[in-house]
Image (cartoon, rainbow, N blue to C red):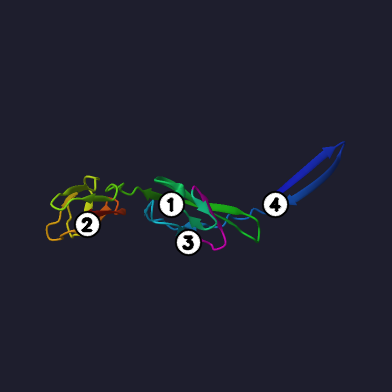
Amino acid sequence: LEFKRVLFRSGCSSSDSASIRVNPLPVVVLSALNPRCVNAGPLQLSGGSPAGGAYTGSGVSGSTFYTAIAGVGTHAIIYTYTNPANGCVNRDTQNIVVNPVPVVNLGADTSLCGGNSILLNAGNPGSSYLWSTGATTQTLTIDTTGRGLGTFDIRVTVTNAFTCFVRDTVRITFT
């Protein structure tokens, strides 16, 4: 851009001009971010272009996104890049969804007399279940049939509609 200024006073004239250069903003792109489960652990952020920018947002430290710190919900991740040649700054934003995990509590470890049974309930209706016995139901009755007396660890893996899963184990002793 060029500006000109002309002054007229008492028949005299003067002019002045200046040029201003407008630098283009850098083209900044952040790739889409796939949903994560809240218990998935840290995610190394990448996909920001051009390289050398900085990531910011809820649950972000350096270039790492911490799902447990951000918590369940939708979070904006911002990638900011500064062009070192001219100082121009631009950014791109992508949302990342952090999904919940099922809450499972099979209860405290317990002892039972032989011949008795215990009903375990993994909760979370609508989820899928896989017990260490091979069963795939929400509830499971445990007794000495086919086991005899002794101590047994019974584990369940519960997977919700977001494909997030959690495990719980209870130790049952039959005496």
Q: Tell us which disc is closer to us: 4 or 2.
A: 2
Give me the C-alpha separation between circle 3 and circle 2: 34 Å
Q: Tell us which disc is closer to us: 3 or 1.
A: 1
Chain-order first, disc 4 or disc 2: 4
Residue 22 part of the magenta segment? no
> Helix, strand or loop at disc 3?
loop
Amino acid, disc 1: Thr
Give me the C-alpha separation between circle 1 and circle 4: 46 Å
**Left or right: residue 63 compared with residue 174:** right
**Left or right: residue 145 compared with residue 99:** left
In the picture of the structure, the residue carrying the numbered disc 2 is 130
Chain-order first, disc 3 or disc 1: 3
> Helix, strand or loop at disc 4?
loop
Residue 111 percent coordinates (x, y): 24, 51
Amino acid, disc 3: Ser
Mark seen at residue 67 = 1
Q: Tell us which disc is closer to us: 1 or 4.
A: 1
Residue bounds of the magenta highlight: 44-58
Chain-order first, disc 3 or disc 2: 3
Chain-order first, disc 3 or disc 4: 4
Amino acid, disc 2: Leu
**Left or right: residue 170 compared with residue 7:** left
In the picture of the structure, the residue carrying the numbered disc 4 is 20
**Residue depicted at 39% across the width and 46% down the height:** 72
Residue 50 part of the magenta segment? yes
**Residue depicted at 46% across the width and 49% down the height:** 69
Residue 6 percent coordinates (x, y): 78, 43
Q: Residue furthest bottom?
A: 51
CA neighbours of label 4 inside 10 A, class few (<14), some (14 to 19), many (20+): few
Give me the C-alpha separation between circle 4 and circle 2: 68 Å
In the picture of the structure, the residue carrying the numbered disc 3 is 46
Is there a contact, CB below 8 Å, between mark 3 and mark 2? no
